[in-house]
Image (tube, helix red, strand yellow):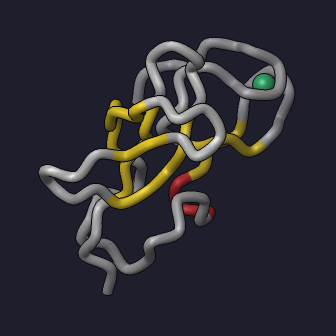
Amino acid sequence: MNDRQLYRLRAPASGREAISTVELGKIYVDRETGEEMKPVAKVLPLAPSASSLPRTPANLRTCRRCDQLIGLDVSDCPYCGLRQTAL
Ligand SMILES: [Zn+2]
């Protein structure tokens, strides 16, 4: 059982992203640019869950245009750019 929530962290100026657990009061810095990264979203699956892997089959769907498997938590297909319907 995994009880640690994963977050998507983003550096506001460069838009660079990382995925990590987050502890309150800690500052997260992009190791390439030195920018401070802020948590912007929770990554599926939401904790607590049976797995900590964000890309298990239960957390994917198929893009209706290009048929690629994409995460449930992305709003635009990373392969063809199609806006995904709400869940
Ligand atoms: Zn697509």
Looking at the image, which is closer to me, 66 or 2?
Answer: 2
Q: In this view, does 60 lie above or below 30?
A: below
Looking at the image, which is closer to me, 52 or 30?
Answer: 30
Q: Is residue 64 above or below residue 37?
A: above
Residue with the most extreme bottom position? 1
Ligand 1 quadrant assignment? top right
Q: Is residue 8 above or below residue 35?
A: below
Q: Position of residue 1 (x, y in %)?
A: 31, 86
* Residue located at (69% from left, 25% from top): 77
**Quadrant placement of the C terminus:** top left
**5 left or right of 11?**
left
Quadrant of res 49: bottom left
Residue with the most extreme front position? 34
Looking at the image, which is closer to me, 12 or 87?
Answer: 12
* Residue located at (51% from left, 19% from top): 85
**79 left or right of 13?**
right
* Residue located at (44% from left, 18% from top): 12
Quadrant of res 80: top right
